[in-house]
Image (cartoon, rainbow, N blue to C red):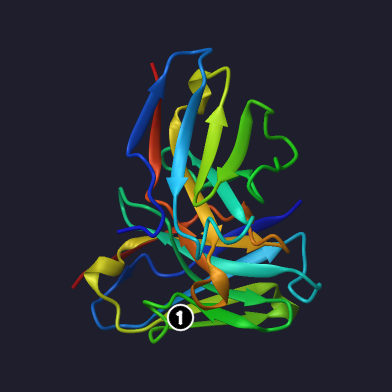
Amino acid sequence: QSALTQPRSVSGSPGQSVTISCTGTSSDVGGYNYVSWYQQHPGKAPKLMIYDVSKRPSGVPDRFSGSKSGNTASLTISGLQAEDEADYYCCSYAGSYTLVVFGGGTKLTVL
Amino acid sequence: QVTLKESGPALVKPTQTLTLTCTFSGFSLSTSGMRASWIRQPPGKALEWLARIDWDDDKFYSTSLKTRLTISKDTSKNQVVLTMTNMDPVDTATYYCARSVESGAFDIWGQGTMVTVSS
């Protein structure tokens, strides 16, 4: 069982927006502004989409945005496109003992 | 251009020790702030962080696996090595090497190497 809780699946039609939640505790998500999000297509390595809760690496479309409220972080994808269909994982710093925790992953289906 | 590539055996027997090597280019692990981690993913399952080594040779391990893991680096060869002892079929997974910088996010990943544990 993963340390961070994500919905198993979400779906949306092209052009719509979807939000994926990532719930942790005050020891990880709620305690630090070090939440990151990764996109993974089948058979491929994960790709960094969001870091430090809401920052986008160069090259990531601004359709992808991140936020956090309390112990829950969220990834929002607006203007859904077919190529956004993938698995998404959240990740958080969890202090100097545990260090890093991942979510269980969310499968995004573009209808 | 930053790249990482994992290498190691595709098949190991139960109880054996797994040794994986991550060979990277485009950055140096002797540069302040640079870090490299190992992360694995069993088939159809979630990512699991295993270990990290920093530019100053600090090392960090998953609390659940720390007794079985050793991470090291060879800065001159641009390599990071992970050893995992007492392998079990549940350790069957794709093992990834990834770079992280100050924020801790994994900004560049290797392609991964699949390891199967079976007799």
Q: Is residue A56 visible?
A: yes
Q: Is residue B117 visible?
A: no
The crowd level at tag 1 (other Cα within 10 Å; few <14, some 14-19, many 20+) is some
User: Which quadrant of the structure image shows residue B55?
Assistant: bottom right
Secondary structure under the numbered disc 1 in the rendered image:
strand
Residue that lies at the very extreme toward the front in this rendered image: A70
Task: Pinpoint residue B48: horizontal percent, then vertical percent.
Answer: 42, 61
Which residue is depicted at the point 45% across and 40% down? Answer: A21
Who is closer to the viewer here, B4 or A108? A108
The residue that label 1 is drawn on is B83
Image quadrant occupied by the C terminus of chain B: bottom left
Kind of residue at disc 1: Thr
Who is closer to the viewer here, A45 or A65? A65
What number of labels is visible? 1
Residue that lies at the very extreme toward the right in this rendered image: B31
Task: Pinpoint residue B30: horizontal percent, then vertical percent.
Answer: 78, 76
Q: Is residue A99 left or right of residue B48?
A: right
Against A100, is B67 above or below? below
Against A25, is A13 above or below? above
Against A14, is B91 above or below? below
Task: Pinpoint residue A47: horizontal percent, then vertical percent.
Answer: 57, 44
Q: Is residue A110 left or right of residue B71?
A: left
Who is closer to the viewer here, B48 or B22? B48
Against B111, is A96 above or below? below
Which residue is depicted at the point 48% across and 25% down? Answer: A18
Which residue is depicted at the point 68% across and 29% down? Answer: A61
Which residue is depicted at the point 52% across and 24% down? Answer: A83
Q: What chain does mark 1 sit on?
A: B
